[in-house]
Image (spheres, rainbow, N blue to C red):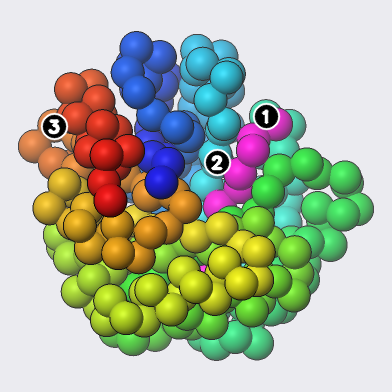
Protein backbone atom coordinates (compact mmCIF):
# COMPACT_ATOMS: atom_id res chain seq x y z
CA UNK A 1 0.00 0.00 0.00
CA UNK A 2 1.03 3.58 -0.63
CA UNK A 3 0.26 6.55 1.61
CA UNK A 4 -1.42 9.62 0.08
CA UNK A 5 -1.18 12.69 2.31
CA UNK A 6 -3.44 15.70 1.68
CA UNK A 7 -2.04 19.20 2.23
CA UNK A 8 -3.87 22.52 2.31
CA UNK A 9 -1.02 25.01 1.87
CA UNK A 10 2.63 25.47 0.93
CA UNK A 11 3.83 25.20 4.54
CA UNK A 12 2.47 21.67 4.80
CA UNK A 13 3.86 20.80 1.37
CA UNK A 14 7.32 21.97 2.42
CA UNK A 15 6.96 19.94 5.60
CA UNK A 16 6.49 16.78 3.56
CA UNK A 17 9.88 17.34 1.96
CA UNK A 18 11.51 16.18 5.20
CA UNK A 19 9.19 13.27 6.04
CA UNK A 20 7.96 10.16 4.28
CA UNK A 21 4.92 9.86 2.05
CA UNK A 22 4.20 8.33 -1.35
CA UNK A 23 1.75 10.80 -2.92
CA UNK A 24 1.11 14.47 -2.17
CA UNK A 25 -2.50 15.53 -2.57
CA UNK A 26 -3.85 19.09 -2.60
CA UNK A 27 -7.36 19.86 -1.35
CA UNK A 28 -9.34 22.30 0.79
CA UNK A 29 -11.40 20.55 3.53
CA UNK A 30 -13.47 23.71 3.98
CA UNK A 31 -14.93 23.09 0.51
CA UNK A 32 -15.83 19.47 1.17
CA UNK A 33 -14.37 16.00 1.56
CA UNK A 34 -12.31 16.46 -1.59
CA UNK A 35 -12.79 20.20 -1.85
CA UNK A 36 -10.72 21.97 -4.50
CA UNK A 37 -7.83 24.14 -3.41
CA UNK A 38 -7.56 27.63 -4.86
CA UNK A 39 -5.36 28.16 -7.94
CA UNK A 40 -3.09 30.34 -5.78
CA UNK A 41 -2.61 27.59 -3.19
CA UNK A 42 -2.01 24.94 -5.84
CA UNK A 43 0.61 27.11 -7.52
CA UNK A 44 2.35 27.76 -4.18
CA UNK A 45 2.33 24.08 -3.22
CA UNK A 46 3.76 23.01 -6.55
CA UNK A 47 6.52 25.61 -6.21
CA UNK A 48 7.82 24.15 -2.91
CA UNK A 49 6.96 20.43 -3.06
CA UNK A 50 9.35 17.64 -3.86
CA UNK A 51 8.49 17.02 -7.52
CA UNK A 52 9.78 13.48 -7.30
CA UNK A 53 6.52 12.77 -5.44
CA UNK A 54 3.46 12.09 -7.57
CA UNK A 55 1.06 15.01 -7.32
CA UNK A 56 -2.68 14.53 -6.77
CA UNK A 57 -5.18 17.38 -7.06
CA UNK A 58 -8.80 17.28 -5.88
CA UNK A 59 -11.28 19.31 -7.94
CA UNK A 60 -14.36 18.83 -5.79
CA UNK A 61 -17.72 17.12 -6.19
CA UNK A 62 -20.10 16.96 -9.11
CA UNK A 63 -23.52 18.55 -8.54
CA UNK A 64 -25.21 18.23 -11.94
CA UNK A 65 -22.42 20.38 -13.39
CA UNK A 66 -20.23 18.18 -15.60
CA UNK A 67 -19.17 21.13 -17.78
CA UNK A 68 -17.95 23.05 -14.74
CA UNK A 69 -16.03 20.02 -13.50
CA UNK A 70 -14.52 19.52 -16.95
CA UNK A 71 -13.26 23.12 -16.89
CA UNK A 72 -11.83 22.58 -13.41
CA UNK A 73 -10.01 19.49 -14.64
CA UNK A 74 -8.67 21.37 -17.63
CA UNK A 75 -7.45 24.15 -15.35
CA UNK A 76 -5.52 21.96 -12.91
CA UNK A 77 -3.97 19.95 -15.74
CA UNK A 78 -1.51 22.83 -16.23
CA UNK A 79 0.19 21.74 -12.99
CA UNK A 80 0.93 18.28 -14.47
CA UNK A 81 -0.60 16.18 -11.68
CA UNK A 82 -0.33 12.42 -11.76
CA UNK A 83 -3.84 12.09 -10.34
CA UNK A 84 -7.00 14.21 -10.48
CA UNK A 85 -9.74 13.31 -7.99
CA UNK A 86 -13.39 14.03 -8.71
CA UNK A 87 -16.20 13.28 -6.25
CA UNK A 88 -19.67 11.95 -7.04
CA UNK A 89 -21.60 13.47 -4.13
CA UNK A 90 -24.15 14.95 -6.53
CA UNK A 91 -24.62 11.77 -8.57
CA UNK A 92 -27.76 9.99 -7.40
CA UNK A 93 -27.22 6.79 -9.34
CA UNK A 94 -24.97 5.00 -11.80
CA UNK A 95 -26.55 6.80 -14.76
CA UNK A 96 -25.68 10.19 -13.26
CA UNK A 97 -22.12 8.99 -12.61
CA UNK A 98 -21.74 7.84 -16.21
CA UNK A 99 -22.99 11.19 -17.54
CA UNK A 100 -20.27 13.01 -15.59
CA UNK A 101 -17.53 10.52 -16.39
CA UNK A 102 -18.31 10.77 -20.10
CA UNK A 103 -17.91 14.56 -20.08
CA UNK A 104 -14.72 14.41 -18.05
CA UNK A 105 -13.11 11.79 -20.28
CA UNK A 106 -14.18 13.75 -23.35
CA UNK A 107 -12.17 16.70 -22.02
CA UNK A 108 -9.19 14.52 -21.16
CA UNK A 109 -9.07 13.12 -24.69
CA UNK A 110 -9.77 16.43 -26.44
CA UNK A 111 -6.88 18.20 -24.72
CA UNK A 112 -4.52 15.22 -24.41
CA UNK A 113 -4.41 15.50 -20.62
CA UNK A 114 -1.95 13.01 -19.16
CA UNK A 115 -3.26 12.97 -15.57
CA UNK A 116 -5.00 9.84 -14.34
CA UNK A 117 -8.62 10.16 -13.23
CA UNK A 118 -9.74 8.99 -9.76
CA UNK A 119 -13.49 8.55 -9.22
CA UNK A 120 -14.45 9.19 -5.59
CA UNK A 121 -17.54 7.65 -4.00
CA UNK A 122 -18.73 7.83 -0.42
CA UNK A 123 -19.18 5.03 2.11
CA UNK A 124 -22.02 6.91 3.84
CA UNK A 125 -23.93 7.13 0.54
CA UNK A 126 -27.15 5.65 1.92
CA UNK A 127 -27.62 8.46 4.44
CA UNK A 128 -26.37 11.12 1.99
CA UNK A 129 -28.46 10.04 -0.97
CA UNK A 130 -25.68 9.67 -3.54
CA UNK A 131 -24.52 6.83 -5.76
CA UNK A 132 -22.98 3.80 -4.05
CA UNK A 133 -19.19 3.71 -4.42
CA UNK A 134 -19.53 -0.01 -5.09
CA UNK A 135 -21.03 0.87 -8.49
CA UNK A 136 -18.14 3.09 -9.58
CA UNK A 137 -15.66 0.41 -10.74
CA UNK A 138 -17.84 -0.44 -13.76
CA UNK A 139 -18.15 3.27 -14.57
CA UNK A 140 -14.38 3.66 -14.21
CA UNK A 141 -13.72 0.74 -16.54
CA UNK A 142 -16.20 1.97 -19.16
CA UNK A 143 -14.68 5.44 -19.33
CA UNK A 144 -11.03 4.60 -18.73
CA UNK A 145 -10.54 6.00 -15.21
CA UNK A 146 -7.37 5.03 -13.39
CA UNK A 147 -8.70 4.39 -9.88
CA UNK A 148 -11.77 4.31 -7.65
CA UNK A 149 -11.70 5.79 -4.16
CA UNK A 150 -14.00 5.31 -1.17
CA UNK A 151 -14.15 8.18 1.34
CA UNK A 152 -16.75 9.56 3.77
CA UNK A 153 -18.73 12.79 3.51
CA UNK A 154 -19.57 13.28 7.18
CA UNK A 155 -16.42 13.70 9.25
CA UNK A 156 -17.60 12.30 12.58
CA UNK A 157 -14.67 9.92 13.11
CA UNK A 158 -16.60 7.10 11.42
CA UNK A 159 -14.70 5.25 8.73
CA UNK A 160 -15.80 3.29 5.65
CA UNK A 161 -15.84 0.21 7.91
CA UNK A 162 -18.69 1.75 9.90
CA UNK A 163 -20.82 2.09 6.78
CA UNK A 164 -19.92 -0.81 4.47
CA UNK A 165 -19.35 -4.44 5.56
CA UNK A 166 -15.76 -5.58 5.35
CA UNK A 167 -16.71 -8.35 2.93
CA UNK A 168 -18.16 -5.77 0.54
CA UNK A 169 -15.04 -3.62 0.74
CA UNK A 170 -12.95 -6.70 -0.05
CA UNK A 171 -15.23 -7.41 -3.01
CA UNK A 172 -14.82 -3.80 -4.16
CA UNK A 173 -11.05 -4.29 -4.19
CA UNK A 174 -11.36 -7.60 -6.03
CA UNK A 175 -13.65 -6.14 -8.70
CA UNK A 176 -11.32 -3.19 -9.23
CA UNK A 177 -8.33 -5.51 -9.55
CA UNK A 178 -10.13 -7.69 -12.09
CA UNK A 179 -11.00 -4.57 -14.11
CA UNK A 180 -7.43 -3.26 -13.97
CA UNK A 181 -8.36 -0.30 -11.75
CA UNK A 182 -6.50 0.82 -8.64
CA UNK A 183 -8.30 1.21 -5.32
CA UNK A 184 -7.96 4.05 -2.81
CA UNK A 185 -9.42 3.91 0.70
CA UNK A 186 -9.84 6.98 2.88
CA UNK A 187 -12.23 8.52 5.41
CA UNK A 188 -11.07 9.21 9.00
CA UNK A 189 -8.68 6.26 8.92
CA UNK A 190 -5.91 6.01 11.51
CA UNK A 191 -3.54 3.45 13.04
CA UNK A 192 -6.44 1.65 14.74
CA UNK A 193 -7.94 0.76 11.36
CA UNK A 194 -4.83 -0.59 9.68
CA UNK A 195 -5.58 -4.25 10.38
CA UNK A 196 -8.94 -3.91 8.63
CA UNK A 197 -7.36 -1.84 5.85
CA UNK A 198 -4.81 -4.60 5.33
CA UNK A 199 -7.63 -7.12 4.86
CA UNK A 200 -9.07 -4.97 2.06
CA UNK A 201 -5.53 -4.30 0.78
CA UNK A 202 -6.19 -1.14 -1.27
CA UNK A 203 -3.41 0.11 -3.50
CA UNK A 204 -3.43 3.51 -1.80
CA UNK A 205 -4.63 4.72 1.60
CA UNK A 206 -5.50 8.41 1.87
CA UNK A 207 -5.09 10.33 5.12
CA UNK A 208 -5.28 13.83 6.50
CA UNK A 209 -7.19 14.17 9.78
CA UNK A 210 -5.26 11.45 11.60
CA UNK A 211 -2.01 13.14 10.55
CA UNK A 212 -2.98 16.58 11.89
CA UNK A 213 -2.51 18.16 15.30
CA UNK A 214 -5.27 16.92 17.64
CA UNK A 215 -6.49 14.76 14.71
CA UNK A 216 -8.39 17.76 13.34
CA UNK A 217 -8.42 17.82 9.53
CA UNK A 218 -8.57 21.62 9.59
CA UNK A 219 -5.44 21.89 11.76
CA UNK A 220 -1.84 21.62 10.52
CA UNK A 221 -0.07 18.41 9.62
CA UNK A 222 2.13 16.93 12.35
CA UNK A 223 5.40 15.69 10.75
CA UNK A 224 5.94 13.07 13.44
CA UNK A 225 2.49 11.61 12.83
CA UNK A 226 3.10 11.52 9.09
CA UNK A 227 6.32 9.56 9.57
CA UNK A 228 4.70 7.21 12.08
CA UNK A 229 1.70 6.46 9.88
CA UNK A 230 3.93 6.03 6.83
CA UNK A 231 5.90 3.33 8.66
CA UNK A 232 2.71 1.71 9.96
CA UNK A 233 1.12 1.63 6.50
CA UNK A 234 4.19 0.15 4.88
CA UNK A 235 4.57 -2.43 7.67
CA UNK A 236 0.91 -3.48 7.69
CA UNK A 237 0.18 -7.03 6.55
Q: Is residue 81 magenta?
A: yes
Q: Identify the residue at image location x=64%, y=79%.
A: 138
* Few, some or many residues within 10 Å of mark 1 (<14, 14–19, 20+): some
In the image, residue 14 above or below residue 94: above
Q: Tell me: 58 left or right of 18.
A: right
Measured as percent of width and height from the top left, residue 209 is found at 23, 44
| Rendering quarter of residue 130 | bottom left
Task: Estimate the spatial distance between the alpha carbons at disc 3 and disc 1, rounded to whole Å.
Answer: 29 Å
Task: Estimate the spatial distance between the alpha carbons at disc 3 and disc 2, rounded to whole Å.
Answer: 23 Å
Label for residue 213? 3
Proximity of marks 1 and 2: CB atoms separated by less than 8 Å: yes
Question: Residue at the right extreme?
Answer: 110
Instruction: Indicate the secondary structure of the residue bearing disc 3.
Output: helix
Measured as percent of width and height from the top left, residue 24 is found at 46, 32
| Rendering quarter of residue 221 | top left
Q: Identify the residue at image location x=34%, y=56%.
A: 186
Span highlighted in magenta in the image: 80-88
Between disc 1 and disc 2, whose residue precedes? Answer: 2
The residue that mark 2 highlights is 57
Amino acid sequence: MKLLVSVINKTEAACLNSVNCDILDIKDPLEGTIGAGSPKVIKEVVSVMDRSLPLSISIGDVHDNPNTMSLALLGVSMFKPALIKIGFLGAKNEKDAEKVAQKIVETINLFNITANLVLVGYADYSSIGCVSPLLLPEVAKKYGAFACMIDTVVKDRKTPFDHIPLKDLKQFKQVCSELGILTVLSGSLDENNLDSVAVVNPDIIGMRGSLCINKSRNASLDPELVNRLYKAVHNSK
